[in-house]
Each structure stands twice: as C-alpha cells, then as structure tokens.
Amino acid sequence: MKFNLSIFLLALLLATSCSNQLDLYPRSAVSSESELTEEDAQSFLMGIYQSVQNDPGRESFIMGDLLGGDLNSASSVNGGGTNAFISNILRPEHSYPKNIWIGYYEALYQVNTLIESLKNLSESPELNQIRGVSHYFRAYIYYNLVSKYGGVPIQRENTMEKLARNTAEEVYAFIEEDLEYAIQHAPDFSADLGGDYHYVSKDAAMAMMARTKLMQGKKAEAAALAEELIAKPYFELDSFEKIFRRQANSELIFAFVNLTIESSINLSTWFYTYAHPQSGSYVFKPNPWAMEMFTASDKRSSISVDTYEGLDVVNKYPSGQTGTDPLNVSRIAEMYLISAEGQGLAGLNRLNELRTARGLAPVFTSSEQQYLDLILEERRRELFAEGFRWVDLVRTGKAVQDIGIQERETLLPIPETELMLNEKLVQNPGY
C-alpha cells in the first residue's frame, strides 16, 4: 500500500534526542510516494498531535462556555443579550459550527490515514503504542463531535463515499471501542512517558472513557474509572495556578503543549484588552454571574477571572498576543467531580475534598437533586473557560431552563455547507 498524505501533509517540529518518548513536537516530512516506516509513523504521530489540536480552531476549546452563558461578546454593554449571542452562533451558516465540524473531520482524516497505514507494519511495542495513541485521538475527535452535534457519520477508514449520520448511541459505542484499544496499547503515563502529561497515555484514555461514560449516564462505570485514576500514586490535586502557568504539577493527565512554533491556538488574545499587560483584542468577556461565582477564599478566583481598568477578563490563558498557553484536556480534578457525580450522595466526600483543596468549606445535603446542583456549580467554577458548561447543562437536561435557550440549541446545527455537499446528512431538529 502506498502512503498517501494528500494535501493535509503535516509539518512537525524539529526533533531532539529522547530515550523513552517522542519530543515536543518533532517536525519532519514523510514522502507521499513511499511505504510508511516505523520512523515515519513516529513523526506522523506528532503531526496528529498538531492536527487534532489546531484543525478544529480555537473556538472549539471554549464553545461550551460561549453556549453555556458564562461568556459573552465583549461588545455587549452590560453583559445582557446572552441568548441572542448564543442564537447568533447557532446558525447553520455561522463560521463556528462550520469550522469545528470541518476541523475535526480534517484531523480524523490524518488519524485514519495513520491507523490504516500501521496495519502494514509489524507488531512491536513501539508501534503498538502509536496504534493506541491513534485510537485515543479518534475517540477524542468523535467525543467532541457527538457531544456537540449529536449523531455524526462514523468513518472507520477514509472514504470518498457520502455517509449518513449514525445515531449518537452508535457513535458512543465506537468511542468506547477505540478507548478500550487505547487503554490496552497506549504508553504508560509513569513508566513509558516519565509522567509527561503532554503525551497521550493509558491514563488519558481512561480519563476520556470516564467522561464518555458520564455523558451517557453510565454513572457507576464513570465513577469506577475516575476512582482508579484518583488512586494512582502520581496524580493528586495541586496548586491551581500551576495547571495554567506551564509549571510542573501532579494534576494534569493530558494537555496539548501548544507551543507557539507549531500552534495557531492562542486563546488569550480573545480575552485580554489591548491595554492589558498581556494585550489582546477583547472579543469575549465573562458575564457578571461568572465573575460572582468565585468567593474571596476560592483559590481559583484570580487565576480564572480578573478585572483590569474596569473591564472583566478571563485570566486562565495569560500568554498574550505573542504566545500560546497549554490546552488542558484531562486533569485529576475532573475525575474527582466525575466520581462525586457518578456515586450520587455517596460521593459527597470527593466533592468536599476538591472544595477543601480549592479553599472552600465543605457542603452537606441529603437531597439528590440539590447534590447534582452542587456538583454542577463546582464543575462550573473548576472548569470555567475550558469548554464544559453547555455540555454539562445539556447532558443533565438543565440547559433550556437554566440558560433559557431554545430546545434546538441543545445541539449545534449541521453546517449549511456540509448539507449541500452531502445530501445524506439530515439537519438537527428545529434548524
């Protein structure tokens, strides 16, 4: 089989020597006329990291906050107009749903190319690890698609055939299949990667599986996976500022390194004003209620939000116009919250352990409904500006009531251009 990279051939960062892992992120080129070799596979895998990170665009990382009501257009005078802001984004012709859809499928093309090409290479520990990471990324792509659009076409291999949408249930089953493979074959976080959270590991696959299980309402399974990760000796809750300030920490399970030389994802320029020391274009700002959810004792407050010269800003991504910030995918705090939610009231201790670590007093309740509300509010504070809010409200059936959006706005519209290109696609209800 000839190796065909097509027009999406990826540039990769210049490699330096490393004994146990690939370097961040080596650049090389693989000839489109040659057979894929083991060395090519390692280089191409680094291109996968870059493609999955960059192709869906920076809006993909905060779409859940834009649609969840915690962020608004900075041109809004008083934080109002949130629903109009959301409805404007959720149009089939809007660039955000279009770019996210196209970007994830572009990244999928790269992942499927590598998975297919690896079938022609021998079984070896190194290649099996690459296979495991590739399947993780395919699961990651499909999770982001199904959680935003509902059922989408499943592509096990690249094809020019126009495909109809699979059901959401079928997509989640496919995600779990890929993650099971990744858990079996991906590198070990501790032994193979030396605890470097910038690379996909078995633990990263477990964390994504826990998230996937929770999304489907498989709470006991989600909690069990989260507890397994919490019990790992190399993960523990750490100082909040370390997670977003490029400091070594014990909390991150997987994060894109997001180096300037290989990344187009710079969130900070969206959030800071031109006059701010970090300098930015101030496109989005926290709504007033997002500013008010942090108390004075909350250790997350100053890292999450700030007020500069009377203007409220998101403060999690501080690199400014000339840099990029790490893009956190999975961290142990999310596992505490998944375990707490998955266990129901029996998981209250996990919720309070997280609250205590963040400087807050314990909470108590005997009501399952009130407990879920407490969990969602803690997720809101902990995961602010990381893309979770809208998905959390949709999966718990609270989005229409709590945000005031329309029922159709619990899913993104299938982009208008995709419907024109593929007559087998069907638009989401109400659009």
Image: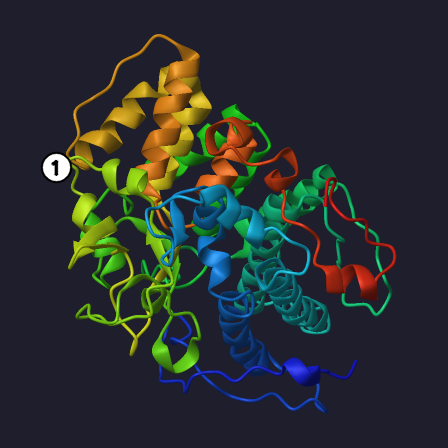
Residue reaching furthest to the left: 297
**Where 69 falls versus 8 (above or below)?**
above
Asked which quadrant contains residue 170, the reply is: top right
**Of the pair 319 and 187, the residue shown nearer to us:** 319
**Where 353 falls versus 111 (above or below)?**
above
Circle 1 is placed at which residue position?
Answer: 296
**Of the pair 51 and 74, the residue shown nearer to us:** 74
Label total for image: 1
Residue depicted at x 56% and y 27%: 397
Q: Which percent across, then down, holds residue 269?
A: 33, 69
Residue reaching furthest to the top: 366
Q: Which percent across, then down, holds residue 333?
A: 32, 40
Figure coloring: rainbow
Residue depicted at x 39% and y 9%: 367
In the picture, measured across the screen, residue 75 lies left or right of residue 301, that is right
Q: How many residues crowd around disc 1 within 10 Å: few (fewer than 14), some, or many (20 or more)?
A: few
In the picture, measured across the screen, residue 9 lies left or right of residue 237, that is right
Dot 1 amino acid type: Ala
User: Which quadrant does the N terminus fall into?
Assistant: bottom right
Residue depicted at x 59% and y 61%: 100
**Where 45 falls versus 218 (above or below)?**
below
Q: Is residue 111 visible?
A: yes
Asked which quadrant contains residue 384, the reply is: top left
Q: Is residue 227 visible?
A: no
Q: Which percent across, then down, holds residue 135?
A: 61, 57
**Where 143 falls versus 322 (above or below)?**
above
Asked which quadrant contains residue 288, the reply is: top left
**What element does badge 1 sit on?**
loop
Q: Which percent across, then down, holds residue 151?
A: 72, 45
Residue reaching furthest to the front: 77
**Of the pair 406 and 380, the residue shown nearer to us:** 406
